Image (spheres, rainbow, N blue to C red):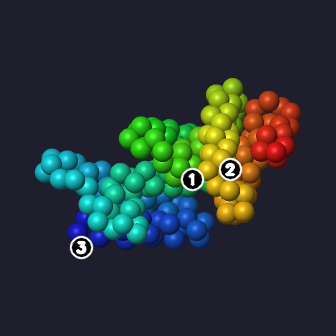
Amino acid sequence: MTNREEFRVLFHQGVDCYEQEDFPQARQNLIKALELTETLIKEESSADLEPDSSDKEDPFEGNLLLQKVECMNLLGETAFNMGDFAEAEIYYRAVIEEYRRMIGAEPQSTEYRECLGMTLNNLGASLLGLERKKEADPHFREALKIYQELYDRFKEEIPAEERDPQQEEFYITFASAVMLNLGETAGTPCENPMMEE
């Protein structure tokens, strides 16, 4: 079994354990998967190879950086669900750093911006869990700003009759969740600006 094949097995086992709420086992599998992605990235970097991205239908399957980021993100979610907010914070900060790099390379990527917004919200929630409300606040505000910008672009670029209602609902629902978290930092409920439109 190659390192890539072993990674896929460990990653999918980790996802299965996470979905079954066996968080300790999910964590163990995902840490091993993360270590493998780091090994593979070093190997390909030292061999001066471009990351394999031949699978156009599922770029995750070939893109080592995306695989690494997804492992770290799931490790953050796993730690959060185990109540280990300090570990979750470490993983979420690393994921945010990677998404900012990716957005720098692909500024128009909606997907990366959506993921960055979600991770900023998750980092804020971890900081709330650590009772660091003041630190959490700017992360929630940046997440909300990102989703407001994405929602505005969605409305500007797609005629009303052609919009996917599920995508529109996704933006509004996410913004509502962020506003609830912002209410926690402020001590008072906050209104979702998208609901006013």
Q: Earlier in the sequence, mark 2 or mark 1?
A: 1
Circle 3 sits on which residue? 1
Mark 3, other Cα within 10 Å: few <14 / some 14–19 / many ≥20: few
Badge 1 amino acid: Glu
How far separated are the C-alphas under marks 1 and 3?
28 Å
- Comparing 123 with 151, the one in front is 151
Extreme residue in the left direction: 47
- Verify CB contact (< 8 Å) between mark 1 and mark 3: no
Label 3: element kind: loop
Query: Label 1: which residue?
Result: 77
Sequence-first tag of 2 and 3 = 3
Residue at (86, 33) in percent of width and height: 188
Q: Amino acid at mark 3?
A: Met
Cα distance between the residues tagged 2 and 1: 31 Å
- Residue furthest top as drawn: 134
| Picture quarter with the N terminus | bottom left
Point out residue 86 in the picture as x, y percentages from the top left corner: 56, 39
Task: State whether residue 98 appears in this view.
Answer: no
- What residue is rendered at 83% in x and 32% in y? 187
Question: Residue 133, image x and y in percent?
Answer: 70, 30
Q: Secondary structure at mark 1?
A: helix
Q: Residue at x 80, y 30 (%)?
A: 186
Q: Is residue 17 left or right of residue 61?
A: right
